[in-house]
Image (spheres, rainbow, N blue to C red):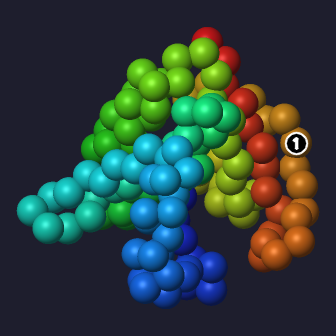
Amino acid sequence: IYTLSLHDALPISDNRARIPREIAGGWQLFVADDRGTIAAMLAFRIADTYLDQIFVAPEYQGRGLGKRLLALVRAHLPDEILLRADARNLKAIAWYEREGFVRESEVMQEGWSGPRVYYRWKR
């Protein structure tokens, strides 16, 4: 579960322009809609077993929506899933580890505001 901080957020116009590019690049994108309110979203790419985004809005957390999204990812990527998380996002990291993801490394990358933790899940 990833909560975007304001300093990391892109303008909405940049994100809207990005969606068709990501889909053309092989990304699977899903949004959980609650009568016009985005409750959650998910983006993963089958080709490299990579889960890029899983986000549940704070007011929808604790209702099992993240587990349902992860089950959808596992249905498409049944053998292995790779992901990275902001090392400061302790809530997400604890959730990934409860869900069976194993920490592989922590890396500071150019262009990011903090270190990223890399995880792998295998069946």
Where residue 74 appears, as percent x and y from the top left, is 48, 24
Q: Is residue 105 visible?
A: yes
Going by the picture, which residue comes out furthest to the left?
A: 35
Q: Which amino acid does label 1 sit on?
A: Ser
Asked if 99 appears above or below 44 in the picture, the reply is above
Q: Work out which quarter of the rendered image holds the C terminus and state it.
A: top right
Q: Give 92 or 8, whichever is nearer the viewer.
A: 8
Q: Give 101 or 41, whichever is nearer the viewer.
A: 41
Q: Give 88 or 83, whichever is nearer the viewer.
A: 83
Where residue 101 appears, as percent x and y from the top left, is 66, 30
In the rendered view, does 34 fall on the left or right side of 62? left
Q: Which residue is at a point 45% across and 76% down the rendered structure image? A: 17
Label 1 Cα crowd, 10 Å radius (few <14 / some 14-19 / many 20+): few
Secondary structure beneath disc 1?
A: strand
Residue 79 picture quarter: top right
Residue, disc 1: 105
In the rendered view, does 76 fall on the left or right side of 33? right
Where residue 109 appears, as percent x and y from the top left, is 88, 65
In the rendered view, does 2 fall on the left or right side of 100? left
Q: Which residue is at a point 89% across and 55% down the rendered structure image? A: 107
Q: Give 90 or 11, whichever is nearer the viewer.
A: 11
Q: Count the marks: how many?
A: 1
Residue 60 picture quarter: bottom left
Asked if 116 appears above or below 112 in the picture, the reply is above
Asked if 7 appears above or below 86 in the picture, the reply is below
In the rendered view, does 95 fall on the left or right side of 56? right
Residue 122 picture quarter: top right
Going by the picture, which residue comes out furthest to the top?
A: 123
Q: Which residue is at a point 67% across and 34% down the rendered structure image? A: 48
Q: Which residue is at a point 55% across and 40% down the rendered structure image? A: 45
